[in-house]
Amino acid sequence: MNRNILIFGSGGFVGSYLAEEFTSHGYRVYGTDIVEPKSSRQFFHDYTSLDMLSFDGVLRLMERSAPDYVVNLAAVSSVGDSWRIPQKTIEVNINGTLNILEAVRKSGIKARILLIGSSEEYAPSAYPISESYPVNASNPYGISKVAQENFAGIYRSSFGMDIISTRTFNHTGIGQPEKFVIPSFVRQAVEIERSGGNGKIYVGNLSAKRDFGDVRDMVSAYRMILESNTSERVFNVGRGICYSLEEILKYIASLVHGKVEVIVSPEKFRPVENPVIWCDNSRLRSATGWSPKYDVFDAIRGMFGSMASGRQGNS
Ligand code: GDD
């Protein structure tokens, strides 16, 4: 019998890949978002446009879709945006999650819930971080995700709900909005290549080191966590290899025939950020058997090719 999954935030970058992942594994995918889906509707059994801040709407959808699994991807998901709109970040990321938890509780549905959190929840570390490393977020987005995880804890202990939280590290792929670093660099590189000459790439903090995965590996990890019989409640989801943005930029610039001049823009810097965020994914590997199939350079080549051919309309 087909199982049902309800995905909040399924109109966005990761949501599109997640819908495809579950549809191709035989699930009936119910999607919802405030926007229309980025990917084709063929990956959805049902798609509802909905503001997750409307509790009545969330409750009705929960009852109608009767999900076995619920995933929350809906969020203000950019750290940079969260500095510009901290109130909205807290409102969407915390009240939206609470609406999902309350709708599951009030409807009495026995769904397993996966809440997508972030490596931005962690305190600084120069080394790979495991789930036991201290949490101490340093930006509004990270704080909202720590709060989401804390709410998961009290809904588990108070109401016996089956909730798993991820701390997901950076990831990229075709379709990621250009406000994020890799599609921003790739778009600028593609424009230089198209011009047939030399050009400039505008960048922020190139000394930051991040652990970039491919979105296709991230969504398979989410499926494997949901399908596992794990008793763990928190999972790091990340590739396990860390590069500086300078190394990433060097690779992207090497795809261009002309000469690339790098311009550092102060407005692209954040007020504060962790110098290194690097994933220890041992728990995920041993609990689910997951292992990544791609690396960040595969993703970059795919994005470059897609943007160069005009196939992809990144927002
Ligand atoms: N956006 C951007 N633009 N970032 C730049 C640039 C630039 O021109 N130059 C350097 N960076 C650096 C940022 O300072 C940061 O250290 C890193 O690139 C990643 O930035 P983003 O791609 O904007 O991602 P984010 O910081 O919003 O976080 C992403 O990863 C988290 C996991 O760690 C998001 O996907 C979050 O949702 C996710 O939880």
Image: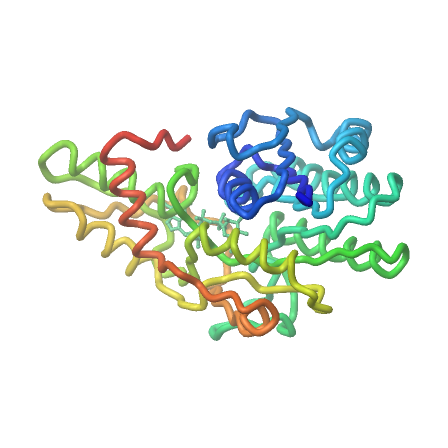
| Residue 43 point in image, percent of width and height | 53, 35
Image quadrant occupied by the C terminus: top left
- Quadrant housing residue 229: bottom right
User: Where is residue 34 drawn, in percent x and y?
Assistant: 62, 27
| Residue at the image point whose x is 51% and y is 41% from the top | 20
Query: Going by the image, does 19 lie left or right of 158?
Result: left
Instruction: Give residue 257's quadrant in the image.
Output: top left
Q: How is the image coloured?
A: rainbow
Residue 69 place in picture, x, y as percent:
70, 47
User: Vertically, is 233 above or below 102?
Assistant: below
Q: Is residue 83 visible?
A: no
Q: Nearer the viewer, residue 295 or 82?
A: 295
Nearer to me, 204 or 58: 58
Q: Count numbered badges in the picture.
A: 0
Q: Which one is in front, 117 or 197?
A: 117
**Which residue is the extreme one toward the front?**
1
Q: Is residue 203 visible?
A: yes
Image location (x, y in percent) of residue 115: 67, 51
Residue 59: name its quadrant: top right
Left or right: where does residue 313 sit relative to residue 152? left
The residue shown at (23%, 56%) is: 250
Residue at 52% from the left image edge and 72% from the top image edge: 280
Quarter holding the N terminus is top right
